[in-house]
Image (cartoon, rainbow, N blue to C red):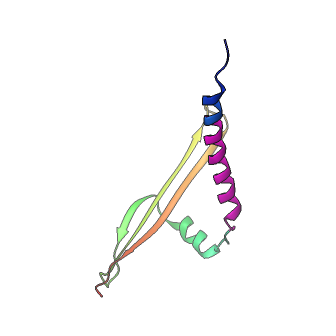
C-alpha cells in the first residue's frame, strides 16, 4: 500500500511556514534594557491584587503579584514562579 505524501507535505509546509514566521519575528526583536528602578519596584510589591487611585481621580493604578515555589517530591528539585504586573488606566475628558 502506498503512503499518501500529499497530506503530509501540506502539513509540513504549514508547520514550516509557522516556524519560519516565528524565526523571522524572533530575529527582528531587539533586546531591551533592564531598568533597576523598575526591578526594585516589582520586587517590593506585596503578594495579591490591589488597585488604588491617586488624588486626581482621573486614573486607576493596579498591581498584582503571584509568587509560589513548586517542588517535585519533598526534597526534589523545585522552581520558583514570581509573576508581577503593574498597570495604569487613565481616562481624561478632552
Q: Nearer the viewer, residue 17 or 63?
A: 17
The answer to whether 2 is drawn above or below residue 79 in the figure is above
Q: Which residues are magenta?
A: 11-31
Tell which residue pokes out farthest to the bottom in this image: 94
The picture places residue 48, in percent across and down from the top left corner, at: 42, 57
Q: Where on the picture, by quarter, is residue 23? A: bottom right
Q: Is residue 50 magenta?
A: no
Q: Residue at x 64, y 22 (%)?
A: 4
The answer to whether 51 is drawn above or below residue 8 in the figure is below
Q: Residue at x 43, y 65 (%)?
A: 63
Q: Nearer the viewer, residue 8 or 45?
A: 8
Q: Give the left or right position of residue 35, taking residue 53 as reference.
A: right
Q: Give the left or right position of residue 57, taking residue 31 as reference.
A: left
Q: Nearer the viewer, residue 10 or 41?
A: 10
The answer to whether 77 is drawn above or below residue 60 in the figure is above
- Magenta stretch prevailing secondary structure: helix
Question: What is the quadrant of the C terminus in the image?
Answer: bottom left
The picture places residue 53, in percent across and down from the top left corner, at: 33, 76
Tell which residue pokes out farthest to the top in this image: 1
Q: Where on the picture, by quarter, is residue 75? A: top right
The picture places residue 85, in percent across and down from the top left corner, at: 49, 63
Q: Nearer the viewer, residue 52 or 2?
A: 2
Question: What is the quadrant of the N terminus in the image?
Answer: top right
The answer to whether 79 is drawn above or below residue 45 in the figure is above
The picture places residue 54, in percent across and down from the top left corner, at: 35, 80
Count of marks, rendered view: 0
Amino acid at each position: 500500500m502506498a503512503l499518501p505524501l500529499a497530506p503530509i507535505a501540506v502539513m509540513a509546509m504549514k508547520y514550516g511556514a509557522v516556524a519560519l514566521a516565528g524565526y523571522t519575528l524572533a530575529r527582528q526583536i531587539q533586546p531591551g534594557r533592564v531598568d533597576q528602578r523598575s526591578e526594585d519596584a516589582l520586587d517590593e510589591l506585596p503578594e495579591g491584587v490591589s488597585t488604588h487611585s491617586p488624588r486626581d481621580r482621573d486614573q486607576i493604578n493596579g498591581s498584582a503579584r503571584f509568587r509560589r515555589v513548586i517542588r517535585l517530591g519533598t526534597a526534589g528539585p523545585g522552581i520558583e514562579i514570581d509573576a508581577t504586573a503593574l498597570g495604569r488606566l487613565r481616562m481624561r475628558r478632552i
